Image (cartoon, rainbow, N blue to C red):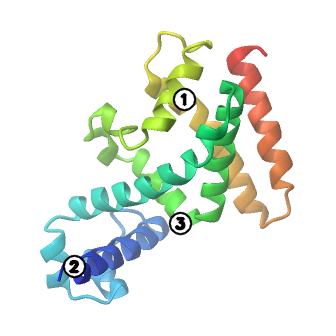
């Protein structure tokens, strides 16, 4: 029973992410999500009594997969610069390889829903990422600033790179763009 329940919740959340990305949170009726997920309206409301609960569930599901991918291989790097380079590359590649989920996370982070979450909720599922950002950025021009500010400053250029690669339809040298953008941001943060 639990497996079937998890499959239904995953189907509902997956349909919701696709539709929210396409139509926005307010432009996506729950009836359409239920239809796309292959469940009844009653089933959707059984698992998610409020649309906001579905939005939050989908965000945390996507975020947990995203964080796992972004942190992959970082522990194997020795220097902070290389750890940050790995995080940067992983973040860009995750966004490019999962455009619907990426755009959903961006939409969520720009919505009123994110303001309802406590700030520590933002990076709580990402202890490795949080630790590297704190350790590395604490020695840059962000010293003494809240990590959320540093995270926002770094995520904006990542967003620009992801969108550029996606919008190019594969016509950009993505490795070169990832490396060049990292170097620009790293120099700006550290002066190195």
Q: Is residue 43 above or below residue 149?
A: below
**Residue drawn at x 53%, y 57% as measured from the top left:** 102
Q: Is residue 175 left or right of residue 147?
A: right
Instruction: Confirm or deny contact between disc 3 and disc 2 (CB under 8 A).
Output: no
Which of the two discs, 3 and 2, labels the residue nearer the N terminus? 2
Q: Residue 97: x, y in percent?
A: 64, 64
Is residue 150 among the parts visible in the rendering? Answer: no
Q: Residue 93: x, y in percent?
A: 67, 55
State the residue position of label 3. 100
Question: For numbered disc 2, what is the local secondary structure?
Answer: helix
**Residue drawn at x 48%, y 49% as measured from the top left:** 67
Give the position of the C terminus as an image quadrant: top right
**Residue drawn at x 47%, y 65% as measured from the top left:** 21
Q: Residue 157: x, y in percent?
A: 66, 38
Q: Tell me the number on the disc at residue 132.
A: 1
Which of the two discs, 2 and 1, labels the residue nearer the N terminus? 2
Q: Tell me the number on the disc at residue 5.
A: 2
Q: Residue 113: x, y in percent?
A: 30, 48
């Amino acid at each position: 029973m639990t497996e079937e329940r998890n499959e239904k919740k995953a189907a509902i959340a997956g349909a919701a992410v696709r539709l929210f990305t396409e139509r926005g949170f307010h432009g996506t009726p729950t009836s359409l999500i239920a239809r796309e997920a292959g469940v009844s309206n009653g089933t959707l409301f059984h698992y998610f009594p409020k649309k906001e609960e579905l939005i939050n569930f989908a965000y945390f599901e996507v975020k947990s997969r995203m964080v796992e991918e972004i942190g992959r291989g970082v522990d194997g790097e020795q220097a902070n610069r290389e750890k940050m380079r790995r995080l940067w590359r992983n973040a860009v590649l995750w966004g490019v390889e999962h455009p619907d989920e990426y755009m959903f996370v961006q939409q969520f982070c720009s919505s009123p829903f994110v303001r309802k979450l406590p700030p520590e909720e933002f990076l709580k599922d990402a202890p490795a990422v949080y630790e590297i950002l704190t350790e590395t950025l604490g020695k840059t021009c962000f010293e003494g600033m809240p990590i959320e500010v540093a995270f926002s400053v770094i995520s904006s250029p990542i967003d620009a790179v992801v969108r550029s690669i996606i919008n190019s339809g594969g016509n950009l040298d993505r490795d070169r763009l990832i490396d060049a953008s990292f170097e620009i941001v790293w120099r700006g943060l550290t002066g190195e």
